[in-house]
Image (cartoon, rainbow, N blue to C red):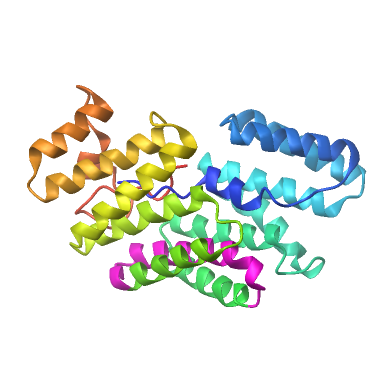
Amino acid sequence: MLLLTGGMVFFFMLSGQKPSGGEAENFYKQGQKLWVAGRYDSSYTLFRKAQSQAKIENNQQLWAQSMQFAGVYLTRQMQIEAAAATLDSVIALSGVFDPLAPFILFARKERAYLDMMKGDFSGAETRYRQLAADCEKLPPTGDSIRATVYEGLGQANFDLGEYRKALGFVEKALGLYNQSSKKDQMPIAVCHNTLAIMQMYLSEFEPALENFLTAVSLLGKKLGPDHPDVLQVKTNIGVLYSELGLFWKSLEYHREVWGNRPSPAVSTSQCPSQHGRYPYHSRGL
């Protein structure tokens, strides 16, 4: 089971940041384009070049923003210690820049997620709570930032087994996404998928199905019907139908996505958290 809350959403949330700085800025913008295209290795190389050039140009903000993306890349590569050191370097600048600057807030959010990856769900929950309290100081234009923090807080509580509490946080996140002035469809779609998975754990299958279908529709419009993340949500729908005993319907989704190959979403052996009822992955996009 996949909670789609990773790199692509991260980019859409941060793409409004406006760096400025000669050659460093060119490297940074090229890195952003490659990130969107899914060429993460090449993107990482460019962000590191932007970081080095920003240091030469004495552009500390662009240096920090490049480091932030590098930290996200290292997280995706499961290089936990390197990612932590990179993100901590960005967070340390909260004494130089506005501590509520988006690139600092998102570095803190990613740092909380690293705790989840290490299995320190309680530590992650504490970080998310502190971050959520700070995000309440943001103006209404910060709704999208608040939303992604509450979604993370929900996932931390989910891993602690606090399913009802987790559901409440994710529902709050969805409301904030919907009232955001940006109203990006990617984060909204991902949040619907996350909400649906949590509803499945609570045996709320009807609203879960509705949220899965909404996620498929929104992701399909943004990414195309054959994108891996669209197919993963369809796999989730197949798992839901199986739970309802509608095996013919589950098989229909299974064949649409996987053909004759076995689906990874029907084996709990892939579950890295403490849950056994459904397979669960904390990152996708």
133 sits to left or right of 151? right
Q: At x 61% / y 72%, what residue is drawn?
A: 135
Q: Position of residue 111 (x, y in %)?
A: 57, 58
Considering every residue shown, the one lying at the far right of the view is: 57
Q: Is residue 30 visible?
A: yes
In the rendered image of this protein, does residue 49 appear above or below residue 70?
Answer: above
Q: At x 63% / y 71%, what residue is drawn?
A: 140
Q: At x 46% / y 54%, what residue is drawn?
A: 188
93 sits to left or right of 135? right
| Number of numbered callouts drawn | 0
Q: Is residue 231 magenta?
A: no
In the rendered image of this protein, does residue 163 appear above or below residue 195?
Answer: below
Pick the residue in front: 114 or 141. Answer: 141
Q: Is residue 79 visible?
A: no
- Dominant SS in magenta: helix
Quarter of the figure with residue 203: bottom left
Q: Position of residue 181 (x, y in %)?
A: 61, 61
Pick the residue in front: 214 or 13. Answer: 214
In the rendered image of this protein, does residue 149 appear above or below residue 256?
Answer: below
Q: At x 31% / y 49%, what residue is drawn?
A: 212
Magenta region, residue range: 137-164
16 sits to left or right of 162? right
236 sits to left or right of 227? left
Quarter of the figure with residue 220: top left
Q: Is residue 162 magenta?
A: yes
Q: Position of residue 49 (x, y in %)?
A: 78, 35
